[in-house]
Image (tube, helix red, strand yellow):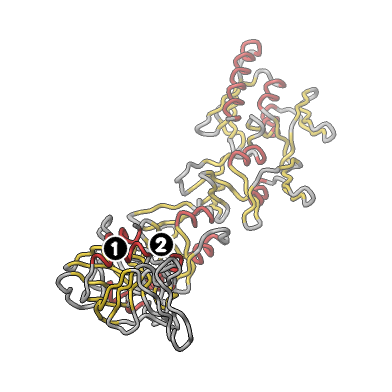
Amino acid sequence: MYWRKLLAFSLILLVGAGVWAAGREIVINLPMFTLSLYEDGQLLRAYPIAVGRVVAPTRLGETIITNKVVDPTYYPPQWYAKGLEPIPPGPDNPVGTRWLGLGFPGYGIHGTNEPGSIGKAVSQGCIRMHNSDVEELADLVSVGTPVRFIYETIQVGLDPSTGQPHIIVYPDIYRLKTNTLSRALAKLSPFRLDGEIHEGALQALLARPTGKWTSIPIQVRVCWEGAPLDEVGYRLGEEIMVPLEPLMLKTGRKVHGLERRRAGGTWYGAATYVAGALGLGLELQEGTPDFYQVSLLVGDEALARETFIYRGELYVAVEELARRLGIPLAWDRDERRLVIDRSPVDDFLIIDHRAYLSRRQLRAHLGVWISWQEGDRKAELIQPKVFLDGEILTEESFLGQGDALVPLRPLAGKLGLALSWDGQQGAALLGRDKRLPGVIRKGRIFVSPAMLAEALPMLGVSWQEERQELHLFWNGEASVGEPLLQESLGQVSQVLLQ
């Protein structure tokens, strides 16, 4: 059934120049392992066959059916001289249940007692068919029916689903060097294509014949952050293949575990999978793939090669970011994990020997937030700003476990309070008797707003999520301000923990 569908599906059978004979005609395409029966130029039947071996190839040319035999007796080659016995009809008969003799002496179309040989080049030159198929064929043809043997390894037709040309390539079983680029281009020349053929990809199709209809590879421009690359890709049906080397050079990364195809000396991969393997964003604009690496803005500087998109989430290389933030980072070789500011981190990505953390992990371990949404080409590192009564106090705060930690020295200076650090207790001493648990970063003391509120009950807090700003203000009398302050702090913690 597959063979019938295969040929009925093809609107054009390119068998070379010639005129179809009136009536019925058999056309046998050897590389296709197919016998086709036509009537007045229209396909009537198609059957799978076996053909001659490489050392005993089936003849090419035109002939006719000269005789038809039901349940033939098989006479082995030189059977009499070799003292062999003819094999009578039955299950052991190599020519099966029918024999259609041809004008080529000694050649015929016949059945077989080896159905597993169909679709292979295994005979002594005759055409083998399944017994049921040759029985049907024998009833459909007569003595004198024309038979044409052809050798067409390349066929071109119109894909009925798209209206575009497509190609089918069969193995060059007799090594006649028929699967050449020039022959394929010549067969495609009468067709109107929707772009320029990618000859390297077409050559690759010819070198790996599948016997299946395939779209024509059409050149596609490939862009990196809006600018065309020197190398082009190609479209194969709905799939877009892009060159790997220039994209790996742009990112400084290698592609691992990705199916690749070699065409014209260049390795290609499917665009969507290449984007995933390299952690890139990808936009398709009118069929043109545009790859980009999310740029990370740290202050006024854009860091290159520091981001990786994985399953729709943005990851950032942690080493450079920690260095810029003054946060100690080390690698525990024994436990094979990161240690950030003396805290172990087990969940991270290793990409080309670099550690990456997600935005949520960066918030937890580095105290910063990365503003980004899928599809954005830029991400921004945000550290909360701290204001006191509407005036900026500092831009050196960072996100702790649920709070924006505030540098204490600028506030102590505003209040005229002495400040010192108790390293053994991990606490700041504010004034004479205020002890606040805190952390040291870049030589500065940081505490949470909750600790400030406890030590200084006249201090109020307001968090503005959209601006990532923490506002401190004088709350008036402590007896009035404390409940409102605690409610505000609870809201801040809830927001920061989301």
Give the residue at x 78% y 30%. 427
Task: Say above or below: 484 vs 192.
Answer: above
The residue at which mark 2 appears reads as 222
Q: Are marks 2 and 1 in contact (CB under 8 Å)?
A: no
Q: Does 356 sit left or right of 33 as displayed?
A: right
What separation in Å lies between label 2 and label 1 (alpha carbons)?
54 Å
The residue at which mark 1 appears reads as 136
Task: Say above or below: 360 vs 36.
Answer: above
Task: Say above or below: 224 vs 446.
Answer: below
Mark 2 or 1: the one toward you: 1
Q: Quadrant of residue 439?
A: top right
Q: Quadrant of residue 416?
A: top right
On-image quarter of the C terminus: top right
Give the residue at x 56% y 60%. 255
Give the residue at x 60% y 32%. 386
Q: Does 377 sit left or right of 139 as displayed?
A: right
Query: Residue 6 in the image: x percent, y percent?
Result: 32, 61
Amino acid type, residue under disc 2 in the picture: Val
Query: Residue 394 in the image: x percent, y percent?
Result: 62, 36
Residue nearest the viewer, comparing 107 with 370: 107
Work out whether mark 2 precedes mark 1 in sequence or the reverse, and give the earlier one: 1
On-image quarter of the N terminus: bottom left
Looking at this rendering, what residue extends furthest in the left direction?
22
